[in-house]
Amino acid sequence: MKKKYKLIEEREAEIVGINHYEGEFADDRDIRFLREPDNQYDPNAVKIMNANKEQIGYLDRKSAKALAPLMDEKKIKLRCEVVGQGDGYCIPVRLKIYKVST
């Protein structure tokens, strides 16, 4: 059965740690959100990758803490829109949270 996605929320967030990674993106559609539950610093970590599977950074801790359990249960899918200029350490984004159903 094909999965269906319904937009349920939008919220401000940040892609952090971009100064530590080489990954870049040309379009918001290139951004992928992957859970990293074995991260030694944060069990709620959400790694952010580009379409070439290069790491861009991480979702900020506050957002990751709220969304990681829902991602683990495969109840949501994330997309984002860049909403401002980064400062070399983080990029402001508007998260779009979609409910996943079959």
Image: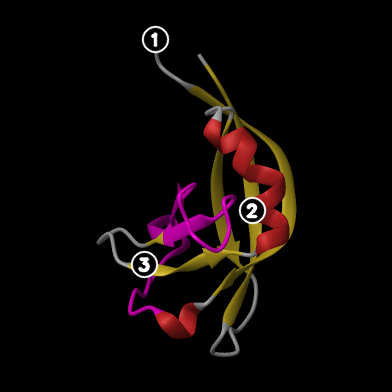
51 vs 92, left or right, is left
Which residue is the site of mark 1? 1
Q: Quadrant of the N terminus?
A: top left
Q: Position of residue 89 (x, y in %)?
A: 56, 85
34 falls in the magenta region: yes
Which residue is the site of mark 3? 55
Between tags 2 and 1, which lies in front?
A: 2
Provide the secondary structure element on which disc 1 rests.
loop
Q: How is the image coloured?
A: secondary structure
Q: Earlier in the sequence, mark 3 or mark 2?
A: 3
Q: Pointer 3: residues within 10 angstroms few (<14), some, or many (20+)?
A: some
18 vs 61, left or right, is left
Q: Residue at x 43, y 56 (%)?
A: 29
Q: In the figure, 1 relative to 63: above or below?
A: above
Question: What type is the residue that disc 3 sits on?
Answer: Gln
Provide the secondary structure element on which disc 2 rests.
helix
Specify the principal SS of the magenta part: loop
Q: Position of residue 90 (x, y in %)?
A: 59, 79
Question: What type is the residue that disc 1 sits on?
Answer: Met
Q: Which mark is residue 64?
A: 2
Q: Residue at x 57, y 51 (%)?
A: 43
Asked whether residue 46 is in view, the answer is yes
Which span of residues is magenta-colored?
21-48
Q: Pointer 1: residues within 10 angstroms few (<14), some, or many (20+)?
A: few
Q: Residue at x 52, y 29 (%)?
A: 74
Q: Pointer 2: residues within 10 angstroms few (<14), some, or many (20+)?
A: many
Provide the secondary structure element on which disc 3 rests.
strand
Q: In the figure, 36 relative to 50: above or below?
A: above
Number of disc labels: 3
